[in-house]
Amino acid sequence: MTTALQRALRREKPFSSPAEQAFLGLTLASLRLAEPWTAYLKTHAGLTPAQYNVLRILRDARPHGVTCGEIADRVLNRDPDITRLIDRLSRSRLAERERDPDDRRIVRVSITRAGLDVLRRLDRPVVDTTQQVLGRLGPKRLSQLNALLDTVIDYLDPPSPDSPGTSSKETT
């Protein structure tokens, strides 16, 4: 019996292992999930997914803003040039930089009112898009999927001992 992944990849041979199949499946699903959202962002807001992600981080960091290093630690896609990304958002007047009054060496980045307005216009489409592409899984399957993804994420990027919600006990 062929799997949906084999059909999507037009692959007749079985995968070499369940891990290979899961890896390719997650990769393909991630790319397919991102395509409509990427197109929507470009068309309706003139943003890339990375710019949108940074704006969300900046909204969460209000009112104090964050440094470029803190943004780099929190972005979904590791962007090697956060500074350029912030430059583009600043030129579009969606973000602004300000020197930290306590330490002039530190530059903090904050979202502007225009950036907040853009995110406000995108909040409903985010809910609609995620519901459209994943909602048909239903609550039980979504809960299972989220638990599995948490396990994978924790394995690939274990929480630091001082992260909120983590204990000092090791898990097996």
Image: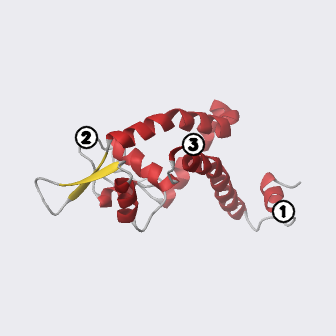
Q: Nearer the viewer, residue 142 or 95?
A: 95
Horizontally, residue 125 falls left or right of residue 28, namely left
Residue 20 % position (x, y): 69, 64
Q: CA distance from mark 1 to mark 3?
A: 28 Å
Name, please, the residue furthest toward the left.
102
Q: Secondary structure at mark 1?
A: loop
Q: Earlier in the sequence, mark 2 or mark 3?
A: 2
Residue 137 % position (x, y): 69, 36
Q: Residue at x 40, y 47 (%)?
A: 55
Q: Nearer the viewer, residue 28 or 142?
A: 28
Local packing at callout 1 (Cα closer than 10 Å; few below 14, some 14-19, many 20+) is few
* Residue highlighted by disc 2: 63
Q: Secondary structure at mark 2?
A: loop
Q: Earlier in the sequence, mark 1 or mark 2?
A: 1
Q: Residue at x 50, y 58 (%)?
A: 155
* Residue highlighted by disc 3: 146
Q: Earlier in the sequence, mark 1 or mark 3?
A: 1
Q: Residue at x 62, y 40 (%)?
A: 144
